[in-house]
Image (tube, rainbow, N blue to C red):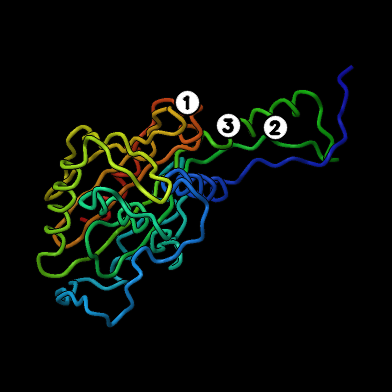
Amino acid sequence: MQKNVRRTTPTSPTPPAAAAAVAALAALVLTGCGGASEAADDAKPGGEKKAEAPAAPAMSQGDLEKLALAEGDVEGFTVEKGAADDVMPPPKGAKAEPAECGPYVDLFMKTAPGEPGPAVLRTVSEKQETPALDGDGDLDMEELEAFEDAMDDAFDVQVVRVGVAGYGGDGAADAMKELRDWTGACQGGFAVGPQKQGVTDVVPDAPAQGTDEATTFTVTVDTEGKKIPMSRFAVYRDGDTVVTFMAMNGAALLGEGGGDWGVPEAVVEAQLGKLD
């Protein structure tokens, strides 16, 4: 006879919760510390540094919202609309050395290259199945094992941050050029943050097509002597709009595998299809 185990009902993380956990873990890996987010540049607004104002973007925030992914657009994935505070300034001290590799920190935090105008953010995560409980909340051994497996797999989830940004004038093309320049110059690695977190490689991935221009690359970090692929990027420009896909996998960040993962084609196809 199979025994039931009476215990508080466990729950595996929901896709949004798992996505938030993976993003937080990635930020810790990036900076090598858990400090609060503050502006990395201590210069105050209105100081001596004054950049020329960029041309007004052709599209508004509302226009971009219509172009961005929505729940139900990608089968097998949950789509969450990002809040304004999801795009934060880099944590204090999260600068790159050499400085020419600094755009990576901004790209990681903003999910948009260069100096965008309006931008919208989506978090897209794999749907996870949660084993069903019996009606009285008791778990038999089979259900208990299923829940334990679900907890073990909770971080082995594909999470993609998708940024859709508008630019004015030549801003979109300039952002892509800057992206190509620093990813080329920083392929040999660089350091980030007060703990000098080592980024060991910025490796170009397979060429991407389907828009005016595109680039893909993987960023690998050194954590306690182990090389870990922290994030994989695919960035596409379509006219004055740039779409950035940043994929992460919690198991890979923890150095526990994660299998063969990257920016899912289904997510890319669904998002680029909405630009037409």
**Could you tell me the amino acid type at mark 3?**
Asp
Residue drawn at x 37%, y 42% as measured from the top left: 247
Neighbour class for label 1 at 10 Å: few (<14), some, many (≥20)? some
The quadrant in which residue 183 appears is: top left
Residue drawn at x 16%, y 42% as measured from the top left: 185
Which marked residue is nearer to the observer: mark 2 or mark 1? 1
Which residue has dot 3 on it? 153
Query: Which residue is the extreme one toward the top?
Result: 1
Can you say whether 52 is above or below 249 in the image? Answer: below
- What is the spatial separation of the Cα atoms under label 2 and label 3, in whole angstroms? 10 Å
The residue lying toward the viewer, choosing from 36 and 213, is 36
Callout 2–callout 3 Cβ contact below 8 Å: no
Q: Position of residue 201 (x, y in %)?
A: 28, 34
Residue drawn at x 55%, y 37% as measured from the top left: 155
Which marked residue is nearer to the observer: mark 3 or mark 1? 1
Q: Position of residue 33 (x, y in %)?
A: 49, 49
- N-terminal of the pair, mark 2 or mark 1, is 2
- Position of 204 with respect to 123 (left or right) is left
Numbered tag placed on residue 147 in the rendering: 2
Q: Secondary structure at mark 2?
A: helix
Q: Secondary structure at mark 1?
A: loop
**Could you tell me the amino acid type at mark 1?**
Gly
Residue drawn at x 24%, y 34% as measured from the top left: 203
Q: Secondary structure at mark 3?
A: loop
Which residue has dot 1 on it? 257
**Could you tell me the amino acid type at mark 2?**
Phe
